[in-house]
Amino acid sequence: MKIRPLPRPSRPKWGEVDLAESIKRLPADYCWQLLNGLSAELNDHITTGLRGDLLSIARNRDVKGYHGLDDLYGLQCMNHWGRPEPGNPAVVRLLVSVIRKHESMELVSKKDRYTACLTAVRQLDEGLAVSPRESWSTDRVFNSMKQILKQVLGPAPDLEMIAEGSRHGPGSSSTISYKDRSSYFKYERWPYAVSPRAKALLVDVIKLDERWVGSLEDAYRERYKIPKWAILNRTAFWDNVVDPQHTFNRVTSVPKDGRKDRPIAIEPAGNIFLQLGVGRIIRERLRSAGIDLDKQQDRNRRAALLASKHGKLFTIDLSNASDTVSLEFVRSMVPSDWFELLYSLRSPNGEFPDGSGWRYAKISSMGNGFTFELETVLFWCLSKAISDCFGHRSDVSLAFGDDMVGMSYLYNHHCIYLREAGFQPNLDKSFVHGRAAESCGIDAFDGVDIRPIFLKHLPRSVLGLYNDRNRLNRWWLRHLGERLPARLDSFFLRFFRGEVLLGPDSDNEFDTYMHAGRFPEGVRFRSITRRTAERPAKDVRFRKLMHTLRSCTGEGGQFLVAEVSERRASVIERVVVGETGYS
């Protein structure tokens, strides 16, 4: 369903919702009770053995045992299923995965996961090549890769091209907290943090926008009490506006599941600004070569479905890809003008929360604004070079980040050359010659996407309950062709306080009302919307840049900074304006 709010004059306000008081207190074993309910409803779709395993694990609240089910019934195991199979593949995947990433399914404590993650980051970096390997200059595959990279990337971009794509990212930076992540604060809070090698480029980019320069000059005069008629010392001005002392990014982690964390690095705001501009240029060069990253994810997914159907394609995923792209490998492969640009914009050092740090042997981290695009172009060009040398130029070669798809007969070649380049194929998530495949977030089996849903958080408000229930309902419709059973609906309904809001099915909106089927066009329904508090962006010199500069959108009104309320929400009336089928 395509839905939209009614026009403002026709939108009556139905009331407010206190999110903290919108649901009853959930039991500590909420996810186990839900697993029991799912197992009971899907009992006929699985074998007695799996049914018994699930019953025993849920009864004993066996977190380790549940995590272990993935080793027995995971996607890789499906390639080796005997007869009879454990059940409907989509149902099996759901039951053994639905709460595997849930915050209550902690197998390793947060502290231990965090410590292990940061330790692994440094160990990985220390294991990277610090000098070029001989094969990088002598092997015909790597020589072919260099030529393809040169053709794809073309000449390094000039200043105007970088400035055109440069923008502030949506997250925090090494000097600006997540709360203040709006672009307004990233423009308003100077001196701008940047690494030493990137200072000159950042200054040149700022100079190209007269409004930005004028805003900085006015703020600079005000801060240092310099009369408007006085001539500014330009050297002192730029030395005070741009701070090039940030030689590091801050290394931290985010949860992956109950067993391990995923590392990220938070860059200086000035570096991210420029990195995103360079990333956009690489993205445009890739599009000209036939890899459109805005659509490539769907191409990889379709290829994975074909791979699981006829076995002519492989899918490869790499372990810790962004942490293993060594500086020396990039120096050896990409054109020298491009390397100098990438090198100047990276953070040369990493710093842990305790203040300790080290010098990077990798080109960039996850969190760098061009990491994803750089990974894509490197892996795609390597795959193309392997096909040129050992296969045929018409062979399928696809890449989206570190998700690669290619011809099955070249799978071993890819593994060999990826390892030679310093990467490690993740054999648990790589597939060749089987009924299963995985790429870009789909789990393919016999040509069908059987990706389960992952419930990750204990609902803390009515929004969380709607989300859990609606996502399960959508899974039921897609894989079993019917709506969520009444007994599971009853499980969720007993935790609501007050009225349950009903609305049309949706493929992308899950946490604002309960999906209740197809609604005819023109039908009105009610849903919850998070209230947005708006902080005034006080400095007129910088607030005017929020939307008009670098095409920043979605961060508040022209003179306001949006902040979503954690507690207050409103109930509004909406209308159905059209229908779409299930995706």
Image (cartoon, rainbow, N blue to C red):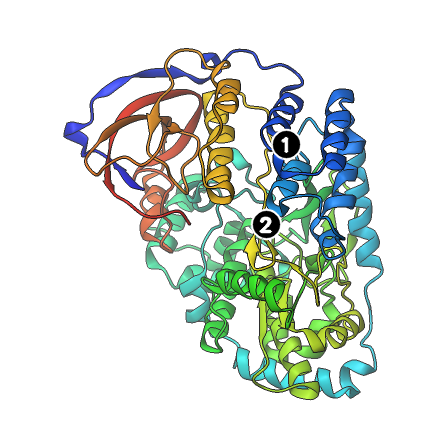
Q: N-terminal of the two: label 1 or label 2?
A: 1
Q: Amino acid at mark 1?
A: Asn
Amino acid marked by disc 2: Pro
Of the pair 303 and 183, the residue shown nearer to us: 303
Image quadrant holding the N terminus, namely top left
Badge 2 element: loop
Above or below — where is 547 with respect to 8?
below
Q: Splitting the image into 4 quarters, where does residue 429 fall?
A: bottom right
Residue at the farthest front position: 84
Work out whether residue 14 or residue 286 is closer to the camera in this orientation and state it: 14
Report whether 402 appears left or right of 513: right
Q: Could you say where residue 422 lies in the image, as x and y percent from the top left? A: 78, 68
Nearer the viewer's eye, disc 1 or disc 2? Answer: 1
Q: Secondary structure at mark 1?
A: helix
Residues at badges 1 and 2 in contact (C-beta under 8 Å)? no
- Pick the residue in front: 386 or 157: 386
**Residue identified by numbered label 2:** 268
Few, some or many C-alpha atoms within 10 Å of disc 2 (few <14, some 14-19, many ≥20)? many
Residue pictured at 31% horizontal, 45% vertical: 544
Q: Which mark is residue 43?
A: 1
Residue 484, image x, y percentages: 48, 30
User: In which quadrant of the rendered view does residue 211 lie?
Assistant: bottom left
For residue 361, what is the image quadrant?
bottom right
Question: What whole-number distance in Å separates the C-alpha atoms at marks 1 and 2?
Answer: 52 Å
Residue 225 visible, this angle: no
Q: Which residue does the image show at 46% across and 72% down from the upper left?
A: 287
